[in-house]
Structures are given as structure tokens and as C-alpha cells.
Amino acid sequence: MRPASFEYHRATSLEHALELLGEFGENGRPIAGGQSLVPMMNFRLARPGHLVDINRLPLDAIEIAGPVLRIGALTRHIAYFDNPWIARHFPAFLDAVHYIGHPTIRRNGSIGGSISHADPTAELPAISVLYDADIVARSVTGERRIKAQEFFLSAYVTALEPGEMVVAVEFPIPPAASTGSFIELGERSGDFATASIGISLEHGGGKIVRAAMVCCGADLFPMRAPEVEDFLVGKPLVNPSGAEAGCIFAASIDPVDDHIASADYRRGLIAELTHRAIEAACTRALDKS
Amino acid sequence: MIDITLEVNGKTKTLSVEPRHLLADVLRQEFGLSGVHIGCAHGACGCCTVHLDETPRLSCLTFAAQCDGSEIRTVESIGGPTAEHALQQAFRSEHGLQCGYCTPGFIMTLMPFIEEMVEQKRLPDDDEIREAMSGNICRCTGYHGIVAAVRKAVNLGLGGGI
């Protein structure tokens, strides 16, 4: 298939892009790497009347800004592999990048695009929910920060308003004694995930003192697991009861039943991935100390 | 229609395109480069991979209008009409292709990988090779021949035996 007709506009500055998006409203979409938007357009599942090309804007910085790591919307996924801050502070993030599409997609796709597209099993939306990131959105009327947990409303549905564009994602930097991991299973390498689990843990004295967990594949958006997070607090890194945590979580979810996997299979898979992700995060912390 | 200037395989041309025209279609129809194969047209098969400003890019997920002023390389720029490049020859000798539909995409995806390995002076293991080509689908070979071809091409680049 080929896309329906649209008008193409190349933004020459962020202000220019926002003016155009403000003018076109729901009929306009920014385009960065196009790795998700263009397939949707080729299938005619998306038919924007106007595309605003933001690729030549300087929005690809990864920088420490006080207590957060600020990642510009146009940062390509490949940039995380050799970024020292990602490796040092966000181990689950770095794990997750390995599961994003394949090398060509990772060279071209951007974080702003992935977040705005909001595929229910995409890695960067999950990671932003895991780490309590703020999505920084801007429009002609100003800038606002939206908590990742309040940003993803359903499959491909976000809290972005017409005319708004993601300009950055800000990740609060965890304390030094923290660890994490991300595990995903799909039908084949680089394909959409059947399910994935991300874990981020703070620890002290050999025990978990704070836990965060995100799951894709259990609902139409990346969901946190507050019951498991509470359960993990106080558990030792050496034997964190990951299997039990997996069972607790699996009992609380109601995953979809479709041609990829039955609901029962998904529940079992999610329990096992939860177990493995917790073990992997704890092992990583123990190896480091 | 939008006027754009592209430098394709070393030749510069200015042409008018509709915004919705995919780079893959423009390369095939306006530049006559039939080595740009279109498999799935939604970024799943890798057949249409070209180099856009030296970076592998799926030309089915790229609008030609976005590429104004860019440099594009297709498989036609590799190894001449008789496909003399070491990677192409290795595909031939190692049974890295059968029907050939996916081959241009594989070659364009793997070229920078092989150059990187040669630059780093190391032979990648099979898992690494498979990861590098994980965005390309081949329905004939079962991939073993392609992995062997990549290994051979890197080996040749490193000046080693086969």
C-alpha cells in the first residue's frame, strides 16, 4: 500500500514546527524517524493531512539537567548504546534498547516518535513509565510536563493535545545504590513484544528498599505493578522471591486472548518474565558490589 | 509537488515529487534503480534498505520529499555490474542467496557492519552477525549461507584466509 495524499512541511525551527502544528491541529503530525508513523500511513491506518518534518531541528541532546537526565525528542535509539549516563544510571533502559526493532530501526527511530506513537508493547514508553519520567510537551501556548503514568491512555492514545509535540523526556536520576533489568519475549527478534517486564530497584544493606516494575502485554498500555513493588520492599538481593512476585502479579492481571497468545499463556509468560527480571536485577546489583 | 535535489550513486538530479511518494518508488521509477526491492512496504522485511547520508535506511519508510539535499547509495553502487564486491562474491560462493529478492537489502544493511568489523579488526561471532541482519527477511536460504558469507567477507577484509 501507499499513503494517502498529504502536504509536507519542513520545520526550520522549533517555533516554526509548533506554529504549523498549532495551525493544523488534529490534521497535522510531526514526523521524525517515521519508523512507526510511515507504516501506519502506508496501511492508511493514519491519514494526516499535513506532515511537519522535524528531523533537521536540534532536539537530539542527552544531558544532565539538575536531578534529571533530559533526552531530546529526536534522540535516535542507537545513541543510548554508548551513552555513559544511560549505562550508569538506567540499566533497565539499556537492556530495553536491545529489543527495539532492529539495527536500521534503531538508527532512525526517535524517542519522541516512540513515545507519541504509544504502541502498547513498545520499549521506550515502558521505560518512561518504569522510571517515572516526565514527558515534556510543547505547543504554541507553552510547555507542560506530563507524568509518564498519566501519558499513555490506551493503545496508540496519549494525553497529547492537538498541536502539541513531545520535545523531551526527563528521567529522574536514581540514587547510586540502584539496579534494574528489562526482559522481553516476542515471536521473533525485533518484532512486537508478546510481553515484557522492566524492574528498577533501590537497595541498601543487601535488601531492596524501593521497587518499581512495569509490564507490557497485560493491558493496552505499559502498566505499573504496585502490589509487586510493595511485596519486594525488604526482600534480600540474594533471594528476592521473584517467583512469588511473578505469581502475585499474574493473579492480578487480565491479559488479552488473541492469535499471538492465549490469555493463560500470557499470564504464565508474564509471571516467568517477572521472576527472571527481578533475579537479573538483583544479580546485577550483587555482581557490582 | 515539491522540487527536490538528490545525489544518487554519485549523480545529482533535481525532480518534482508528490509528498506521499516513497523514496523506494522514486529510486525505482525516476532513477531506474530496480535493485531497490520493495517487499512489505511497512518496515518489516528490509528489502528496500539504502544508504541515506551513509546510514542504512528503509526507503519504504522514507518520503522522497524528506531527502532534499541528501546523498543516497543503492546496491547498484556496490561492486559494479558484475557484483565484484567481496560481500557480493561471498554471497555467491556461500549460497547466501537463491531467488535474490532480499539480497540488495542484505548487502546494504551489512556493508557498514562489515566495514565496522574490519576497522575494529575482529571477526564477529554468529550471534552478532545474526543481530546485525535481524531486520532483513530471507525466505530461501535459511540464513546459514548469509551468516557464512558475512564471516567470509569480514575474513577477507581482515586479510585472513577463508
Image (cartoon, coloured by chain):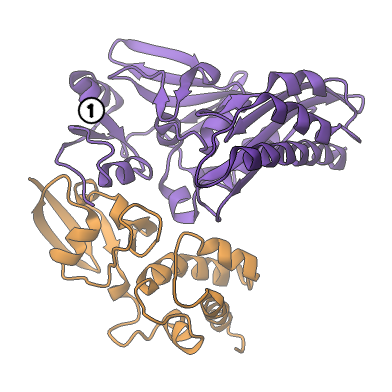
Tell me which chain appears purple.
A
Name the spot of residue A99 as percent of width and height, x first. 57, 47
Quadrant where the N terminus of chain B is found in the figure: top left
The picture quadrant where one finds residue A205 is: top right
In the figure, A235 relative to A103: above or below?
above
The picture quadrant where one finds residue A35 is: top left
**Residue at point 43% right, 80% down?**
B97
Tell me which chain appears orange.
B
Name the spot of residue B19 as percent of width and height, x first. 15, 44
Residue type for callout 1? Gly
Label 1 CA crowd tier, 10 Å (few <14, some 14–19, many 20+): many
Q: Nearer the viewer, residue A229 or A69?
A: A229
**Residue at point 63% right, 44% down?**
A184
Quadrant where the C terminus of chain B is found in the figure: bottom right
Q: Which residue is mark 1?
A: A28
Name the spot of residue A96 as percent of width and height, x first. 60, 41
**Residue at point 50% right, 69% down?**
B115
Q: Is residue A286 visible?
A: yes
Q: Nearer the viewer, residue B12 or A208?
A: A208
